[in-house]
Image (cartoon, helix red, strand yellow):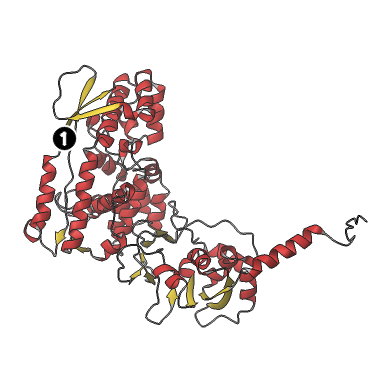
Amino acid sequence: MEERFRRDPEFELEPFWQERSAEFARSLLRYEVTLRLTKAGAARLPHMTDRVAAEEALAATPAQDAEGRLTVTLAMQSENVAVGQLLGLAVEAEVLAPGSPASAVRGGGADAGGTARVPRAGPTSGQQHARRTRPVSGIGQQEQARTISPAWPGPADYSAPVNSQNDQLLAEGRGPAAAAPVSTNVVGLCEVFTDPLWRISVHLSPVEVDLLRSEPLRRLHFIAHGGASTITTLQSYSRLEHSLGVLSLASHFRPTDQVLRVAALVHDIGHLPLSHTFEGVADLDHHSIGTDLLQADPLRAVLASNGISAEAVVAAMGNGSASPLSSHPDLLNLDHLDSYVRSGRAAGRLDADPVALLDRLDLQDAVLSTDRETAGTLVDLVCAEARLHTSWDNVGPVSVARRLVRRLLDSGAADPYRLARMTDPQLWSAFDSLEATRAEGTMLRYEPHRLRVVSGGAPDDPSSWDYALRKIYSSAPLVDGDRIETSAPELAAALDRLRLLPTRFRVRWT
């Protein structure tokens, strides 16, 4: 006899499914982690892990300790899941037990008191480096020790919001609250900016926040550091990213030198669209443009309102005096250090951990000094950068962009000053709007593979044009306080061989 299914009239599918789904999710939580949380960490915990498990763990927690922290035992799925979720808590959590997850989240290890901290770096690869404790750099801020692992590559705590008001609202159950910014926020919404390359955390001072919100600094977010080579390579990071990197380095070596920190942040404000691509066309020079911008509003007013003179910043940038930002042209400064290392990462040629590199560098007066091994790593990066500048990837696109800019100026569609203050998107829009530049500008973006570049002089060809590289950078650090010519002559010889690279080319479309 056929039986028919009869649904219980009191059965409700939706709550049944929700209950069973919750039971299944809870059955997966078989790995226990004991955490010591700040108040902000406790507020964020339910948003980073299983919400119900986090809320139950917090509810079962006794009162805060003398430092205002909570110790909770939290059920999680596995060690790997714990690693991924706890990284988001960054410095708001300490792992007390077990002795690992993943060696305190892959390398954070234990501090001198045996406490594992959630680190800012991820799984180790290659040579293991000794951990060190680095202060958070800031002006007038109490230094906070943070145990880090210089393992490379690995994620930093970019996702960790820094918003005490938001955390307070969440902790008191008065949400929903405003979304919090991440620690790589570039408009000054976080008290602490974390540079993703150097993994330096910088307490932003009021003048630095004001500058980050000014038009000259915001514009740099839309200027490619690699110039026209971004068309054919992955050198896509911005001048603002580089400027924040130089600020991070300045705050690392001279944390209380506010004028130097400001100079580091604004040192590139005069850059033209596509950075160095058409430097010198119509006598445009980003150094002189930057000096003029500093001595005019809005920057002059921003500096004055914070008790800083524009003249002092100009001097700290190295105009007429030795500076960590612009020392002798043959010696490595903070500006070039960030450029070489950041470019090396973008090009996939950076084998060393930037944190480990930084640990081995000292700033002696206005010049960087290091050991022989680290100097060799940096010289390799300098040589690789020179080869990039003389490659097809740079010469071809740059030579075309310079031709287009000259046509733009010759047509009267833009004067030199207006051109100099464009962003990269505005420059491409200008090329598209003018008949004399539209077709070739489109070819440059979508068909760059059609470019042919040969070094040296070539037979006359009316369809080709000359291009000359303005300069090849070859700065180097001191080695144990001495110039490399005497302390590491083989490295000096490697830099000297850069003079053999071609600097004159012929370029044409095929």
Total labels: the figure holds: 1
Which residue is more in the foreground, 444 or 124?
124
Pinpoint residue 243: horizontal percent, then vertical percent: 33, 50
Does residue 394 lie above or below 144 as drawn? above
Q: Is residue 421 left or right of residue 501?
A: right
Pinpoint residue 482: horizontal percent, then vertical percent: 10, 61
Q: Report whether residue 267 is seen.
A: yes
Extreme residue toward the right, this view: 1
Q: Report whether residue 52 is seen.
A: no
Q: Residues within 10 Å of mark 1 (few under 14, many from 20)?
A: some
Pick the quarter of the image with the C terminus.
top left
Write the residue at 40% across / 50% down. 212
Which residue is more in the foreground, 416 or 195?
195
Judged from the image, the secondary structure of the residue bearing numbered disc 1 is: loop
**Residue 193 falls in which quadrant of the image?**
bottom left
Q: Is residue 236 left or right of residue 9?
A: left
Does residue 253 lie above or below 467 as drawn? below
Identify residue type, mark 1.
Thr
Extreme residue toward the front, this view: 1
Q: Is residue 468 left or right of residue 255?
A: left
Pinpoint residue 469: horizontal percent, then vertical percent: 19, 35
**Residue 410 falls in which quadrant of the image?**
top left
Q: Which residue is mark 1?
A: 503
Pick the quarter of the image with the N terminus.
bottom right
Extreme residue toward the top, this view: 462
Write the residue at 46% across / 66% down. 90
Pinpoint residue 314: horizontal percent, then vertical percent: 25, 49
